[in-house]
Image (cartoon, rainbow, N blue to C red):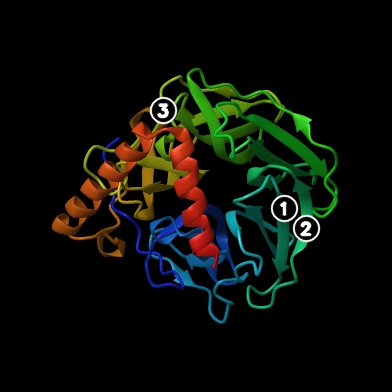
């Protein structure tokens, strides 16, 4: 994959570092805009800044805050150790439905919440629709029968598990999802971590971020999968459709991504990624899955200077290498101290 430029998406903290995009395309427009994106700021991996925001566009490249929308839509949790993440957006019956997770970095405790708005300005209070020990990356759609479908990934993150599972549950209304059903999605040699799902006339397609077995979530690549029933997913290729570049801003990890189909074989993909320095952002690719190419986003890009990038990447690579060779018990102590300092 040739690296794209990083989109200049404004964030409340001013970093232009956003992650976990979910894009809805409304060809004839909704409230004056064709493209709607939910995402979260993530400046240098600061999860306390990871609070849901909403951005709009008429070309999918130049993004703005919707006028008078709260920014962020949801403030950070008041409880130490908790943070938000993983947004997903649905526009149904002229109402915006924004889903996001809240999770505790010290314990196996996660919720999925929903807020809604008919005008993009006034939003309901969060309603918890899921509360279990784990769960990430909710992907929500309304199918052709009017049924709500929710997929998510289960994985023991505290133990850095090399196993994950995909689940799906359904609902007639998005605040009453039923019991989760185990799905099948296997990528040989990889652990599935995040996904987005699209409903088509005949089945479903998904973009899946997965990391090589034996590594961690910061080494994810992007895969494509499809399913006729939403339960049994098959990857289109055992090779990633996008992976970290060699020298670009996205040279460490390709993360949660979102997409639309331009034709039977052509896609537009908004992908989140990070450099070795943990500078996060969102890029755009287009084309057939086997030949995705960067979209020319011109002046709508945001990138550090070459000198700044080289310095940041070198520090990031050294830090990651040290962590990988340290005994696990020392890493746990360092992380525990760091988390306590951040929560104070």
Q: Are marks 1 and 2 in contact (CB under 8 Å)?
A: yes
Q: Name the residue at the bottom extreme.
A: 68
SS state under label 3: loop
C-alpha separation, residue under disc 3 versus residue under disc 1: 30 Å
Q: Earlier in the sequence, mark 2 or mark 3?
A: 2
Residue, disc 2 = 128
C-alpha separation, residue under disc 1 versus residue under disc 2: 7 Å
Q: Residue at x 75, y 71 (%)?
A: 125
Image: 59 above or below 122: above
The x, y position of residue 156, in whole percent, is 63, 35
Residue, disc 3 = 240
SS state under label 2: strand
For the N terminus, which image quadrant?
top left
Q: Is residue 94 visible?
A: no
Q: Residue at x 69, y 39 (%)?
A: 151
Relative side of 244 to 220, left or right: left
Of badges 3 and 1, the one in the foreground is 1
Image: 214 above or below 50: above
Q: Earlier in the sequence, mark 1 or mark 2?
A: 1
Relative side of 190 to 286, left or right: right
| Picture quadrant where residue 76 is located | bottom right
Marks counted in the figure total: 3
| Picture quadrant where residue 254 is located | top left
Pick the front one: 55 or 218: 218
Relative side of 92 to 286, left or right: right
The x, y position of residue 5, in whole percent, is 28, 52
Of badges 2 and 3, the one in the foreground is 2
C-alpha separation, residue under disc 2 versus residue under disc 3: 34 Å
Residue, disc 1 = 111
For the C terminus, which image quadrant?
bottom right
């Amino acid at each position: 994959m040739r690296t794209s430029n990083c989109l200049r998406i404004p964030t409340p903290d001013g970093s232009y570092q956003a992650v976990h995009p979910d894009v809805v395309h409304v060809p004839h427009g909704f409230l004056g805009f064709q493209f709607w994106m939910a995402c979260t700021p993530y400046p240098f991996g600061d999860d306390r800044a990871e609070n849901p925001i909403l951005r709009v566009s008429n070309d999918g490249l130049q993004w703005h805050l919707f006028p008078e929308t709260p920014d962020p839509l949801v403030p950070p949790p008041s409880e130490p150790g908790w943070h938000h993440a993983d947004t997903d957006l649905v526009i149904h019956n002229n109402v915006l439905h924004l889903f996001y997770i809240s999770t505790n970095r010290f314990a196996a405790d996660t919720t999925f919440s929903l807020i809604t708005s008919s005008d993009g300005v006034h939003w309901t209070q969060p309603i918890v629709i899921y509360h279990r020990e784990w769960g990430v990356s909710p992907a929500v759609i309304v199918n052709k029968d009017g049924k709500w479908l929710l997929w998510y990934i289960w994985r023991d993150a505290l133990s850095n598990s090399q196993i994950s599972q995909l689940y799906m549950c359904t609902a007639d209304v998005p605040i009453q999802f039923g019991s989760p059903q185990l799905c099948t999605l296997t990528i040989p040699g990889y652990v599935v971590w995040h996904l987005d799902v699209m409903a088509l006339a005949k089945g479903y397609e998904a973009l899946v971020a997965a990391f090589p077995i034996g590594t961690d979530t910061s080494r994810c690549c992007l895969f494509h999968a499809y399913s006729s029933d939403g339960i049994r997913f098959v990857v289109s290729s055992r090779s990633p459709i996008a992976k970290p570049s060699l020298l670009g801003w996205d040279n460490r990890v390709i993360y949660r991504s979102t997409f639309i189909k331009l034709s039977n074989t052509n896609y537009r993909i908004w992908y989140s990624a990070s450099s070795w320095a943990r500078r996060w952002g969102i890029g755009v690719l287009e084309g057939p899955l086997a030949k995705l190419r960067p979209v020319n986003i011109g002046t709508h890009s945001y990138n550090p200077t070459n000198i700044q990038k080289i310095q940041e990447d070198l520090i990031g690579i050294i830090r990651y290498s040290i962590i990988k060779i340290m005994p696990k018990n020392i890493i746990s102590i360092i992380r525990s101290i760091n988390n306590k300092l951040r929560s104070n």
